[in-house]
Amino acid sequence: MAEFTQYLMNGLMVGGVYGLIALSIVLIYKSTRVFNFAVGDIMLLGGFVLWSLLAWLNLPLLPSLLFALAIAFGIGLLIERLALRPLIGQPILAAIMATLALSIFLKGAMILIWGTGQIAYPTKISPGTSMTLDTVTLSSGLLWAFLLAMAAFVVLVWFFQSTKMGLQMRATAEDHQLAQSTGISVKLVFGLTWAMASLVCALSGISLGDRLGLSVGMTPLLALKAFPAVFLGGLESIPGAIVGGLAIGILENLVGGLINPNLMEITPYIILLVILLFRAEGLFGLKRIERI
Amino acid sequence: MRPYGTYDETYAQDMAVCRTRLQWCILIGWLVLLLSLPLFLGEWMINFMNFIGISVIAALGLNILTGYAGQISLGQAAFIGVGAYTTGMLARYLLFPMWITLPCAALAAGLVGLIFGLPSLRIKGFYLAMATLAAQFIIPWLIINIRPDITGGAHSFRVPAATVGIGDISLATETSLFYLIIPLAALMTFFAKNLQRSRVGRAFIAIRDNDLAAEVMGINLFSYKSLAFFICSAFAGVAGCLWAYWMRAIAVDQFSLMESIWYVGIIIVGGLGSTSGVIMGTVFIRGLDRLVKIIGPSIEGAVPQLTGPWGATAALGPMVFGLVVLLFIILEPRGLSHRWEIFKASYRLWPFSY
């Protein structure tokens, strides 16, 4: 039982990070209808930028954290402007391939700058040490990642429910042309969406890097596990992203811990296949009805 | 756009791939040139040609699935892997000759592709890309974990040289493999080209353009989509079989997600739904990659401060590929084959090109 609780808590915490990455994918998909395959690399880039600020420029932690997030915001704007905007109205394969090509390009660029080795932050970013509740041990890095995911979720829900920009984004997600005709700047919305998503990505990259270190070979693969989370939760749903992330994290850890550690890597993908076969719209997504 | 003076008088003429005597001459000239290449090219170039030939076969399959049937697959490399491991195991444990392992590899990869294509009836677009992405992770996992004593697990798996089954001839050298790979690639190209003009190909194109309309017209979506997946993966299986005989040591990391993305990149750069585009795209992308590998070290030598301590060659390959594919999607979404058509049209219309 203690073992079970431990794996459950581990899964819940890891699921927080998956949820954060899934959140970033859902943000972009909701308003631009583009599925961002480059999410892992943008995430890694955010982590690397913070590392450079800390290790090369020797800035203190808080300013470099803010600075790194600002840079991630800018990178998101830049990606949207240079790579995705020319593709508005193109077939779906073009957008998929554009983000895939972007992902490979970013991988190359990151190998050029930071190399292929594993990099760890000079100091631990998350404060505190791991704590023990009864029989369950929670590492501080995981706990912080989980809290961060929850905070990002709350902020985003508030943003979409209560701010003007958030409402504009939801309107754009509904229908680009209608939104434009009511005076919403669709270009601004697209740019801002990518910027926000890349900021969320960078946050998850930093929390992952804090716990596991950063490397071009490893970190983007972790982000791919957020894809099943996105589909489980439903592509358009922000709560779905968090729920999906947590569920994938828990299932992965339970299967890995209690059945076979080898199965851990592919559990998310098996879940993905099952979802696609039996409930393609996910738990909270919109069901597509086709009429002739 | 047809050259002046080319008329069709019979149905057979209308359907012919090669319409004029000049085209026949060019085709035969090309084939003769291609097959005599080993006479004047070195080992290195022959090796590269073999690589291109294998890539062309795999990309042709993906082009049938993506370019004609409009289904997206991010799992081509995994299906190549299925073909390669099937070949490897049959050749090593059962000592089967090449002409048995080749169809077996195609069949095995085709069936695995069929399984992962099954969701295609319910889902489309990038939902389907996701199902094939899952294949890209599940298949290597199965190869590593199910029977590591047979497949070699995560270690590389040694494959014996291809045997023909007559006497003890075996295709071990690059040149002898060249005469296996290149004719096979030409044959597969011919098959892919003709498939597009057949009933099946027309059905694929109808599904790509509008699957609802296609279904209303009486095209059985499920069987045709499954067929597209089967053909695509069977091509991958053939490529995998050749890959196994060519590399002689196969490992799961040769069939990574990255490799699958390269194949999608190849057909996009070449031009979706164009058989000649596949060849152009393969030569272009693989050639560019080789070029980067050659000039990479000299860039490292010329600007050491730019490349850091890690070397630029490993970084420049993906960067160039990503950039080229992005530029093609943005500036020329119809790929090299469209450029070639434009060039042909303007050449024929010259000097009155408007």
Image: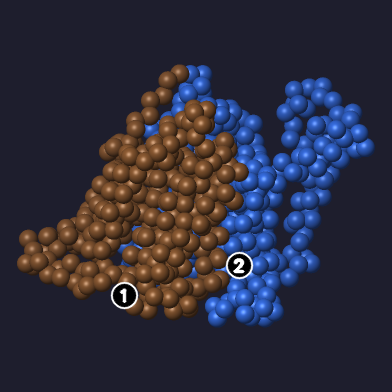
Chain colours: A brown, B blue
Q: Position of residue B341 (x, y in %)?
A: 76, 40
Q: Position of residue A32 (x, y in %)?
A: 47, 40
Is residue B316 in view? Answer: yes
Callout 1: chain: A
Dot 1 crowding, Cα within 10 Å, few <14, some 14–19, many 20+:
few
Give the residue displayed 54% in from the left and 78% down from the top: B310
Q: Which mark is residue B135?
A: none
Q: Position of residue A91 (x, y in %)?
A: 55, 37
Dot 2 crowding, Cα within 10 Å, few <14, some 14–19, many 20+:
many
Quadrant of the snapshot with the N terminus of chain B: top right
Is residue A267 in view? Answer: no
State left or right for residue A143 relative to residue A220: left
Most foreground residue, B7 or A247: A247
Amino acid type, mark 1: Lys
Residue A152 against residue B46 in the figure, above or below = above
Quadrant position of residue B271: top right
Most foreground residue, A110 or A182: A182
* Residue topped by disc 2: B316
Amino acid type, mark 2: Leu
Quadrant of the snapshot with the C terminus of chain B: top right
Classify mark 2: helix, strand or loop. helix
Quadrant position of residue A130: bottom left
Residue B41 against residue B28 in the figure, above or below = below
Q: Position of residue B136 (x, y in %)?
A: 42, 53
State left or right for residue A69 relative to residue B273: left
Most foreground residue, B300 or A31: A31
Give the residue displayed 35% in from the left and 63% down from the top: B144
Give the residue displayed 15% in from the left and 70% down from the top: A131
Residue B268 against residue B46 in the figure, above or below = above
Q: Which mark is residue A124?
A: 1
Give the residue displayed 38% in from the left and 63% down from the top: A205
